[in-house]
Amino acid sequence: MMENLEDKIERFLNNEMDVNEVADFKNLVKSDYSIYTSVVEAAKLNKALSQIISGNVDQAKIEKMQSLEKTIEKIASEYKLKQTKRSRPAVKWVAAAALAVIILFLGKVYLLDGSRYDTLYSEYYKPVNSFFNLEPNFKLKDTSLVSSFMKLYDNQNFSEYISKYYNVSKGAKIDSSDQTIISFYAGVSFMEKGEHKKAVGQFKNIKKSDRFYNESQWLMALSCIKEDDIKNAKYILETIVSNGTDYADEAKSILNDLN
């Protein structure tokens, strides 16, 4: 089976030809300017692709790569027109290569939004242990109210937990220490349900003097990231770093990823 031109270009750029093949291919390129331009464009696209995969794309390159989105639309439309006129295989190869670069570029560099923030969130969020695991001695001074909530949380009945939380909040006044525990885990339950905006609202109720303040700040920052609220996320993370809490190192790491 005779090798087509697009395969030859690919093998040439990947250094897969022997000495004789290289010589023959160079002669072919010299004899046809359209093949020469196809090889040059393919080489540029290969280089860009390598930079994208390795992550070595600075701001200037990012801006330049963004213009490729418009370029590829033109290439694709031209290809459709030329295809009806039995265009050269080289045109098909360049169009396909350009499309591949754009797709990878959009996936790895250009989309600095939801998908990237979701990845950050998943990397740093860890399920929160039950209060009974954090404070095993608490059972000795257990209140039935906190215990009933923790049983729901331990069984991952997050919706029922939140429903109970709203009902209790409308009732009689709750001891402040119990209220802090219940409110904090309501926020975590919202996170587990994917309702991060509501989780932020819960964590804001935790005061600086409360037992779960540092944990609330950390989880609130992660919830903001999940909600794409990067401005507030950065502010909270910077505060965590400044305060030197147990989450300071992780906060620094996320800030580096966000900047």
Image: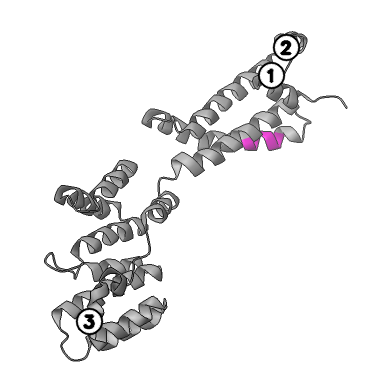
Which image quarter holds the N terminus?
A: top right
**Would residue 31 be seen by someone viewing this image from the given angle?**
no
Residue type, mark 2 in image: Val
On residue 12, which mark appears?
1
In this picture, is 99 found above or below 175?
above
Q: Nearer the viewer, mark 3 or mark 1?
A: 3
On residue 140, which mark appears?
3
Q: Camera-side residue: 89 or 253? A: 253
Residue type, mark 3 in image: Leu
Asked if the residues shown at circle 2 and circle 3 are in contact, with their CB atoms under 8 angstroms apart, the answer is no
Q: Which residue is farthest bottom?
A: 172
* Residue matched to label 2: 22
* Disc 2 secondary structure class: helix
Asked if the residues shown at circle 2 and circle 1 are in contact, with their CB atoms under 8 angstroms apart, the answer is yes
Q: Where residue 61 appears, x then y in whole percent?
A: 42, 29
In this picture, is 99 found above or below 214?
above
Q: Earlier in the sequence, mark 3 or mark 1?
A: 1
On residue 209, which mark appears?
none
Write the residue at 19% across / 53% down: 245
Tell me where the magenta segment starts and ends, as one range: 76-81
Q: Image quadrant of residue 49?
A: top right
